[in-house]
Structure formats: structure tokens, C-alpha cells
Amino acid sequence: MIRIRPQREADPAAVELLLDKSFGPDRSKKTVYRLREGVPPLPELCFAAFDGRELRGSLQFWPIQVRPLRSDGAPVPALLLGPLAVDPDYAGRGIGVGLMRVGLQKAAAQGHRIVILVGDLPYYARVGFGRKGAEGLRLPGPVDPDRLLIRELVEGAATGLEGLIEKPAAEKAVADPASGATKREAAP
């Protein structure tokens, strides 16, 4: 029986082995990996699927933003779904869809509004992804535009969205002189 749970501190090595088994060692050459370099996944949105003690699937979400084409527009925060990996020996058993349902539900509950991914429409349409709303988006490298998919977690969140998908703005710690507390804000 497959059990889905949040990823734990001990899981990353097993996840990397599963990703290599599922996608091959050249997977990091894909354009979406440029968005992940130097940016940690959101730990509260990383999930693992187990059959007993064996890892059979994993899903991660990463923070991204869409920089509008107009220079006066503020970047729009979003999530990048992936990689989603399922042990090839367990393909077709609903593990990937189960992981996505759990992850998308948790992302919505946390207030995230938009999720973007690169993948096959027939597969990801099962959990609400589509091309509508992604037509004006670009990635920082080559990608088949038919594989760039989007899902709104809040209706209308991606209306009119167009621009470059990029890493989120860097944050820096800033001391608040009034309270002495430290807060995070976007670096200039």
C-alpha cells in the first residue's frame, strides 16, 4: 500500500537516486533546473510516496516569479512543480497524481495562487493544468511551448499574466530599528 507523507531530512539521497532512475543523470541539463539552481525547494511542499520502506515517488515545489514584460509591473510570485518522479516499476498506479493532489491542496491552503510546470498536457490535465494562461510566459532557455503548463489555485490569479519565469528575488535580513527584530525583504 502506498503512503504519502512530507519528505524528511533523511529522504534527499533516496530522492536523488529515484530522480536518476526516472529521468537519467542528464536531467539537470533541462531549462527548469536553471530556476532551481541555488534555490532550495519549499520543504513544507516536498512529499514522498512509500511502499513499506521503499521510496516509490517524490514531488517538490520551488518558489519562482514571473517578471512582467512591462518594466513597471511588479513580479508575480508562483510555484514551480517538479520534479515529480515515480519509480518506473510502479508507473500507472496513481502515485504521481496522488502526490500532486496532496501537494496542490497544501499549496492552496498555504495561500499560493499559481503553479507552473513543464510537462505533458494529457498527464497533468488530470489535476487541472492546462495551456490557457501560459501562452505569454517564457522560460530562461529552450522549452517546447506546448509543454509549459499552468494551474491557478485562486481563480483569476493568472489572468493577463505574461513575462519571464525566473528565480524569486533574493532576500536579505533587515533589522527593524523600531522593534529590533529581523525581517526578510527583497534585496534591491
Image: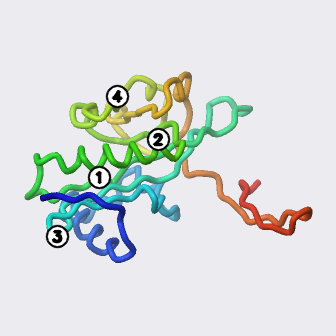
3D distance between C-alphas at marks 4 and 1: 17 Å
**Disc assigned to residue 130:** 4
3D distance between C-alphas at marks 3 and 4: 32 Å
N-terminal-most mark, 4 or 1: 1
Percent position of residue 46, x then y: 39, 59
In the picture, which quadrant includes the N terminus?
bottom left
N-terminal-most mark, 3 or 4: 3
Decide: is 177 above or below 186: below
In the picture, which quadrant includes the C terminus?
bottom right
| Residue drawn at the location 27% of the way across and 32% of the way down | 121
Q: Nearer the viewer, mark 3 or mark 4?
A: 3
**What residue is disc 2 on?**
108
Q: Quadrant of residue 149?
A: top left
N-terminal-most mark, 2 or 3: 3
**What residue is disc 1 on?**
84
Q: Amino acid at mark 4?
A: Gly
Callouts 3 and 4 close, C-beta under 8 Å:
no
Q: Secondary structure at mark 4?
A: loop
Percent position of residue 162, x then y: 55, 29
**What residue is disc 3 on?**
54
| Residue drawn at the location 22% of the way across and 36% of the way down | 123
N-terminal-most mark, 3 or 1: 3
